[in-house]
Image (cartoon, rainbow, N blue to C red):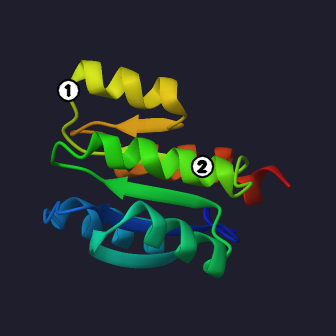
Amino acid sequence: MQAGNGIKVIVTMIGLDGHTTGGEVVSMILRDAGFEVVYLGVNQTPRMIIDAAIQEDVDVIGISSHASNYSQIEELVDLAKANGLDDMLIVVGGNIPREPAAQLLAKGVHKIFLPGTSGAAIVEYLSTEARSARV
């Protein structure tokens, strides 16, 4: 059985962040590991991402972040909680400075993957922590 069997993940960039390489690479890694990936691409608002998460019934939202859009990520966390998505993981990957990373974790982001994190580490984390994996 593959690691991601039964786990559905949204991968996207939030706001005006146009850096797509990280999100595209992680999407391919997750697909190769057996995850079902919904790639939303760029220019997504927090509301658009939450609406897609509800419609697609995903287990994980993954944000590729390489811009100073941390307030939008915090808004996404708030919207997830307001919509009863408390058991859905929200993870962020990218070059995020220490202080904003600490604020995002305190706000409710479950995990931040910094540059240099291996694909295997991402797959392992999601395959053990996503709600479908815990059922």
Q: Amino acid at mark 2?
A: Leu
Density class for disc 2 (Cα within 10 Å; few <14, some 14-19, many ≥20) is many
Q: Are marks 2 and 1 in contact (CB under 8 Å)?
A: no
**Is residue 20 among what the camera can see?**
yes
Residue 10, position as x, y percentages in the image:
48, 69
Residue at the location (67% across, 46% down)? Answer: 128
User: Which badge, 2 or 1, is on the more N-terminal residue?
Assistant: 2
Q: Amino acid at mark 1?
A: Pro
Residue sitting nearer the eye, 39 or 54: 54
Q: Is residue 10 left or right of residue 114?
A: right
User: Residue 97 got which mark?
Assistant: 1
Q: Can you say which quadrant of the picture contains the N terminus?
A: bottom right
Residue sitting nearer the eye, 35 or 86: 86
Residue at the location (18% across, 38% down)? Answer: 95
Q: Secondary structure at mark 2?
A: strand
Residue 88, position as x, y percentages in the image:
66, 53
- With respect to residue 52, does 74 lie above or below? above
- With respect to residue 102, does 78 lie above or below? below
Give residue 50's quadrant in the image: bottom right
Give residue 55's quadrant in the image: bottom right
- With respect to residue 90, does 110 lie above or below? above
Give residue 24's quadrant in the image: bottom left
Residue marked by disc 2? 89
Q: Is residue 86 left or right of residue 89?
A: right
**Is residue 124 among what the camera can see?**
no
Residue at the location (56% across, 53% down)? Answer: 79
Residue 93, position as x, y percentages in the image:
32, 46
Density class for disc 1 (Cα within 10 Å; few <14, some 14-19, many ≥20) is few
Q: Can you say which quadrant of the picture contains the C terminus?
A: bottom right
